[in-house]
């Protein structure tokens, strides 16, 4: 697979910086053969050239804010690892996440490997209609 990811996502105001391209490639590399295409600016991406390499094309977005330069991008899969609204800009099936912490990335890796179930405990149990 060809992974397109940001070389080093910037830290934006009070939020933490998301995972960098090398980290994502290493983690996905535990499951797939990964070739990394690290980028600094979405406007510099040549989607036709990337698609022409003949590999499954995975885009990982790791910014807090949406990237308008991604409008019209058509990877085979979009990993929206920070801002789930990024899926509005990319025309592709997507895996959405509200987190990029190691635990969340590990869970995604297990999901990609085909593991099912959510290990752990719920922080709270929401009431059901029957409880009201």
Image: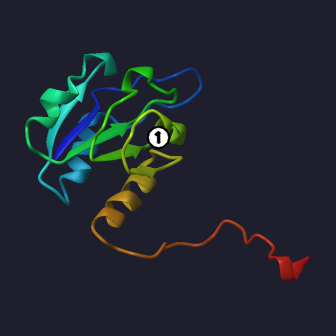
- Residue at image x 53%, y 72%? 120
Quarter of the view holding residue 7: top left
The percent position of residue 25, horizontal first and vertical second, equals 22, 44
| Quadrant housing the C terminus | bottom right
Along the line of sight, the residue nearer the viewer: 28 or 80: 80
**Number of numbered discs present?**
1
Is 70 rendered above or below residue 75?
Answer: above
Quarter of the view holding residue 59: top left
The percent position of residue 34, horizontal first and vertical second, equals 14, 47
The percent position of residue 76, horizontal first and vertical second, equals 27, 47
Colouring style: rainbow
Is 97 rendered above or below residue 7?
Answer: below
Question: SS class of the residue under badge 1?
Answer: helix
The percent position of residue 71, horizontal first and vertical second, equals 40, 27
- Residue at image x 38%, y 51%? 93
In the picture, measured across the screen, residue 97 lies left or right of residue 79, that is right
How many C-alpha atoms fall within 10 Å of the one at disc 1: few (<14), some, or many (≥20)? many
**Furthest residue in direction left, as rendered:** 53
**Furthest residue in direction right, as rendered:** 132
- Residue at image x 36%, y 29%? 72
Along the line of sight, the residue nearer the viewer: 117 or 54: 54
- Residue topped by disc 1: 87
- Residue at image x 45%, y 76%? 117
Along the line of sight, the residue nearer the viewer: 68 or 15: 68
In the picture, measured across the screen, residue 117 lies left or right of residue 33, that is right
Quarter of the view holding residue 104: bottom left
In the picture, measured across the screen, residue 116 lies left or right of residue 39, that is right
In the picture, measured across the screen, residue 122 lies left or right of residue 53, that is right
**Furthest residue in direction bottom, as rendered:** 130
């Amino acid at each position: 697979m060809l992974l397109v990811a940001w070389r080093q996502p910037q830290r934006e105001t009070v939020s933490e910086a998301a995972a960098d391209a090398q980290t994502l490639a290493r983690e996905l590399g535990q499951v797939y053969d990964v070739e990394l295409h690290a980028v600094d600016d979405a406007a510099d991406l040549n989607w036709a050239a990337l698609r022409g390499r003949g590999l499954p094309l995975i885009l990982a977005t790791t910014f807090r804010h949406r990237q308008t330069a991604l409008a019209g991008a058509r990877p085979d899969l979009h990993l929206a690892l920070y801002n789930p609204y990024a899926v509005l800009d990319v025309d592709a099936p997507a895996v959405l996440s509200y987190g990029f912490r190691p635990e969340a990335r590990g869970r995604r890796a297990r999901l990609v490997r085909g593991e099912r179930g959510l290990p752990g405990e719920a922080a709270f149990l929401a009431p059901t209609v029957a409880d009201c």
